[in-house]
Image (cartoon, grey):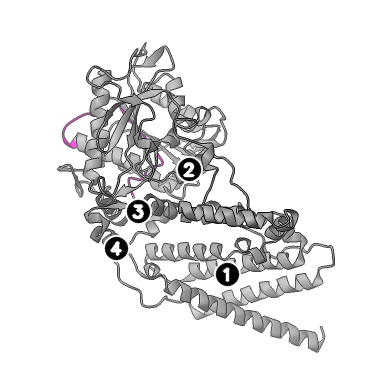
Amino acid sequence: MSDSAGSQSTAGMQAMLAAGQAMAQNFFDALARQQVAMQDSSGVAVPKLPMPESAEMARMQQAFAEKHVALWSSMLARKPGGEATPVVQPEPGDRRFTAPEWSESPVFDYVRQAYLLNAGFLKEMAEALPIADGRAKSRIQFLTRQYIEALAPTNFAATNPEFIKTAIETKGESIAQGVRNMLGDLEKGRISMTDDAAFEVGRNLALTPGAVIFENELMQLIQYAPLTEKVAQVPLLIIPPCINKFYIMDLQPENSLVRFIIEQGFTVFLVSWKNPRPESGGHHTWDDYLDKGPLTALEVVRAVTRVKKPNVLGFCVGGTLLTSALAVARARGEEPVASLTLMTTLLDFADAGEIGCLVDEASVTAREATIGKGGVLRGQELANVFSSLRANDLIWQYVVGNYLKGKTPQAFDLLYWNSDSTNLPGPFLAWYLRNMYLENNLRVPGKLKMLGEKIDLAKVDMPAYLMAAREDHIVPWKSAYLARNLLGGDTTYVLGASGHIAGAINPASKNRRSYWTSDARPTDPDEWLEQAGEQKGSWWLHWIEWLRQHGGKQVAARGRLGSTKYEPIEPAPGRYVKERA
């Protein structure tokens, strides 16, 4: 190497080091402006971010600079029309740069790889911050990911070759359509994820035949019509989450969990929660939801079927509510149900996933002082939080597709449901955030009182089937596993593939993906997984065989819905689920 080339290389390295230092400083300044990220779980403001040790910082900056020099060198050495070996690759599952335009153009190939190097550097910096508080550290890493994903070159017209290609091919029509899409979404107050006109609850979603046989100010209770001549004597009551509409469990006939259960010969009842309004539903508490939700629904199911101990199933926070209600019943000396199924449910909130890192003393105190005294958390605000957990998939993908490329999202029932948000009563939410996510009180025997009873999950001692999803970012599967150490009865634990929704709603008719089972019951989830065997197909088929063991004898299907006391009010899916936030 000549002295001139050597000095140029040294100068380039120094320039890259300086650029890395500047980027790191700008990044930390941006984090410092996020006041919520500067609070540990005690609510004490952190005046300044603790920086990594100087030696560690120097090592990361040196490696960062060397990679950028290597990238620049590979770009200079690239022959016209040829392709260079990438210095850095997107992470597995990152589909943002799969279009050939990113690699065919030296300019955009450089933009892509430089972004990936910068992103990796900032993630490494966030990981290296010496922050002892686990919740605060997780929050910093969450904010880092939000920062990185927002600044991706895919999100901007000038740095996205797919935008340029589409604009040329459509002679600018894609730009005009993108503007129209953006204006339309501004009117809606949210980003369109699917073709909203393609779906309607009761028309092509939530179609399983049935009737509302009871309602109060918090819920409607649906009884579904039988689809078999014989049914299990013991019915099943389903408690879905109150933070979403119930029809995630009854989308279309081919992917409806409700219909699948009925086709297997079970009588099914389901709670449809009301979408609370600020003027009328903003005063309800956690106790209200227990009393007027699962406990009332169980009374009606018993009266209609004359079965003292139904089977029950809870999904997500519906499972937390249901288990709490059963703990109340057991504290009263009752034996409320024959079996309990929990789908992606947290009872121990020690590691509550990415939502948990967003909950701290300051944010909960603020909620308690405002809507905690009355009012609602708007559904769109709640939806935005969940979307931010997977921003690339649920925000930026549609910014690029809808606005830059001028496309109309495809019709997708799951994303239609995802956009059909629900409000939450402030008192309910504030109590839930403090006692579950912030203080993790539910797992402590006698720590919480609900409906005047001290709660002990060990008294919830009926047989339980616990289902979690391996890639769930809302209910981490290892945290869901910890319910086995809290419940007092025999538990069966099954781990499904995929995430929070796709893992749970895995239709048996398609029988895709896989799930893991094991008869072992160690206290440690990793030890359980080491002994578990993978089974191909849907976990629904495994679960329904477990449920049959608690279904009792076969009897003739009931000829009518409801009873003389609980006459049908209206056809399923009822009014409540159709109310928009």
Residue in the picture at 67% in, 73% down: 68
| Quadrant in which the N terminus appears | bottom right
Nearest the camera: 335 or 516?
Answer: 335
- Tell whether position 336 is magenta: yes
- Marks 3 and 1 sit apart, C-alpha to C-alpha, by 29 Å
- Marks 3 and 4 sit apart, C-alpha to C-alpha, by 15 Å
Task: Give the extent of the magenta segment.
Answer: 331-348
Asked if the residue at tag 2 contacts the one at tag 4, i.e. Cβ–Cβ closer than 8 Å, the answer is: no
Secondary structure under tag 4 reads: helix
Nearest the camera: 290 or 514?
Answer: 290
Identify the mark at residue 121; answer none if there is no mark. 1
Mark 4 is surrounded, within 10 Å at the Cα level, by few (under 14), some (14 to 19) or many (20 or more) other residues, namely some
Majority secondary structure of the magenta segment? loop
The residue where tag 3 is placed is 350
Q: Position of residue 45 (x, y in %)?
A: 33, 73
Q: Earlier in the sequence, mark 3 or mark 4?
A: 3
Asked if the residue at tag 4 contacts the one at tag 3, i.e. Cβ–Cβ closer than 8 Å, the answer is: no
- In this rendering, does residue 578 appear at all? yes
Q: Nearer the viewer, mark 4 or mark 2?
A: 4
Nearest the camera: 552 or 300?
Answer: 300
Q: Is residue 173 left or right of residue 376?
A: right
- Marks 1 and 2 sit apart, C-alpha to C-alpha, by 32 Å
Mark 3 is surrounded, within 10 Å at the Cα level, by few (under 14), some (14 to 19) or many (20 or more) other residues, namely some
- Marks 1 and 4 sit apart, C-alpha to C-alpha, by 30 Å
Quarter where residue 112 is shown: bottom right
- Tell whether position 461 is magenta: no
Q: Earlier in the sequence, mark 1 or mark 4?
A: 1
Give the residue type at disc 4.
Glu
Secondary structure under tag 1 reads: helix
The residue where tag 2 is placed is 529
Q: Earlier in the sequence, mark 1 or mark 2?
A: 1
Identify the mark at residue 361; answer none if there is no mark. 4
